């Protein structure tokens, strides 16, 4: 048991490789033209409304072990999405949750999913997320909330060797957490059978569809038990998301607690340059500013990210890099250093624009232009969180 993904044991060994390409855009299509004026916007800090929950976590009709674990995590008053979704989930309803990133969505589905798995030994769950990092965050929270339950699972993501995942799957785990590409790989290999999965969760559905996973998602859900409870969480509810929900749900209850649009708390501006040597000097000036305490710098490709990170390190900045060319273990170590403020600057491809949960990033700097305006919104959404004002600066060539 010591090497398995278990809710009563330690972490597994991290693998190193992946046969499926990442969702990085290092060789992506030609960029959309975005008028520079769209990168300029004053911050309009939005005062957070004081939410008075209808329940406490102890009020929920959930297993006592889960309640104890939640109390140990300091969970007392639920967030709006948790307050609305958990009772309905515990009652067996299909749920569509519309909520911003960072609103406590994971616990909103983790509590009812874990409760059902504990109550019914025949139940199994499959949980899909758009990025490896988000899948790992979900796994960590499931592990903590479900500690001592005896449930076990498998984390199926790229950037990890197949061997450890194959060993975990031989134990027929009851919780599968993964990214669509790697989950589909295992289904096609015959190493993962999910016909008995009667719980499905799609987290950040809109982002998975943005990344081109719609066919993978349809195929995966088509392999699950038709008589299942489904959870869908998304920041937006457009026609593509609706098509998935209509195809794979029965009378879902929609809960919308989304507050404001990304960018309200973000001061957005452009940085003009007309030569490469001027560009790096302007970045240097931004990074030495006293207000820049933690910065996420986006560049286009694996090579450009590595080159920029090395240049900043040579200039004395506490810097590291993350991109799809690094193994999952390497990416996790870099992210851990960034979260723990062991490094001040993280240079990244768009792999960090989705699923990166670091609350104290003061500046997002687009050293290269994003592919699309939606990508820009995802990038800058890494700052201005938890009611704080953030700064987004985009380099634009004259």
Image: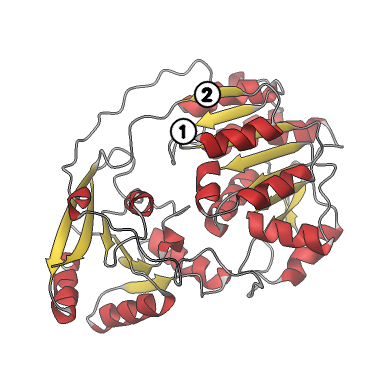
- Do tag 2 and tag 1 residues touch (Cβ < 8 Å)? yes
Q: Residue at x 64, y 75 (%)?
A: 17
Give residue 52's quadrant in the image.
top left
The answer for how far apart the CA atoms under marks 2 and 1 are is 8 Å
Q: Quadrant of residue 310?
A: bottom left
Q: Is residue 74 visible?
A: no
| Residue at the extreme bottom of the image, as rendered | 314
The residue indicated by pointer 2 is 255
Residue 67 showing in the rendered view = yes
Image location of residue 43, percent across then percent down: 19, 41
Relative to 247, residue 273 above or below = below
For the N terminus, which image quadrant? bottom right
- Does residue 248 appear left or right of residue 86 in this picture? right
Q: Residue at x 71, y 25 (%)?
A: 250
Relative height, residue 264 to residue 271 (above, below): above
> Residue 2 at what x, y percent from top left?
76, 62
Horizontal and vertical percent position of residue 120:
83, 32
Q: Nearer the viewer, residue 15 or 19?
A: 19
Residue drawn at x 76%, y 61% is: 186
Mark 2 surroundings within 10 Å by alpha-carbon count, few (fewer than 14), some (14 through 19), many (20 or more): some
Name the residue located 28 percent from the left edge and 42 percent from the top edge. Answer: 263
Crowd around label 1: few <14 · some 14–19 · many ≥20 (10 Å): many
User: Mark 2: which secondary structure?
Assistant: strand
**Tag of residue 99:** 1
């Amino acid at each position: 048991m010591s090497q398995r993904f278990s809710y009563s044991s330690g972490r597994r060994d991290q693998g190193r490789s992946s046969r499926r390409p990442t969702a990085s855009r290092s060789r992506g299509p030609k960029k959309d033209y975005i008028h520079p004026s769209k990168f300029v916007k004053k911050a309009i800090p939005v005062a957070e409304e004081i939410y008075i929950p209808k329940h406490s976590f102890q009020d929920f009709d959930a297993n006592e072990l889960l309640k104890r674990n939640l109390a140990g995590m300091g969970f007392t008053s639920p967030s709006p999405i948790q307050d609305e979704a958990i009772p309905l989930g515990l009652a067996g309803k299909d749920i569509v949750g519309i909520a911003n990133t960072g609103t406590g969505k994971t616990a909103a589905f983790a509590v009812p999913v874990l409760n059902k798995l504990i109550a019914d030994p025949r139940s199994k769950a499959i949980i899909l997320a758009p990025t490896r990092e988000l899948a790992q965050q979900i796994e960590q929270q499931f592990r903590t909330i479900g500690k001592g339950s005896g449930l076990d699972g498998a984390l199926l993501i790229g950037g990890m060797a197949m061997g450890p995942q194959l060993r975990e799957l031989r134990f027929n785990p009851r919780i599968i957490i993964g990214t669509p590409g790697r989950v589909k790989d295992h289904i096609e290999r015959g190493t993962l059978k999910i016909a008995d999965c009667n719980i499905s969760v799609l987290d950040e559905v809109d982002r998975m569809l943005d990344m081109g996973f719609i066919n993978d998602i349809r195929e995966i859900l088509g392999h699950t038990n038709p008589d299942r409870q489904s959870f869908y969480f998304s920041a937006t509810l457009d026609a593509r998301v609706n098509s998935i929900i209509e195809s794979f749900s029965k009378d879902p209850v929609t809960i919308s607690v989304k507050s404001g649009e990304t960018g309200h708390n973000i001061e957005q501006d452009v940085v003009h340059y007309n030569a490469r040597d001027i560009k790096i000097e302007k970045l240097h000036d931004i990074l030495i500013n006293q207000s820049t305490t933690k910065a996420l710098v986006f560049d286009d490709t694996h090579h450009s990210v590595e080159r920029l990170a090395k240049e900043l390190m040579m200039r004395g900045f506490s810097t590291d890099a993350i991109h799809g060319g690094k193994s999952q273990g390497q990416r996790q170590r870099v992210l851990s250093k960034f979260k723990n403020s062991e490094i001040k600057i993280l240079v990244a491809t768009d792999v960090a624009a989705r699923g990166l949960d670091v609350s104290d990033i003061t500046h997002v700097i687009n050293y290269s232009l994003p592919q699309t305006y939606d990508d820009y919104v995802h990038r800058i959404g890494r700052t201005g969180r938890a009611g704080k004002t953030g700064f987004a600066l985009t380099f634009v060539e004259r």
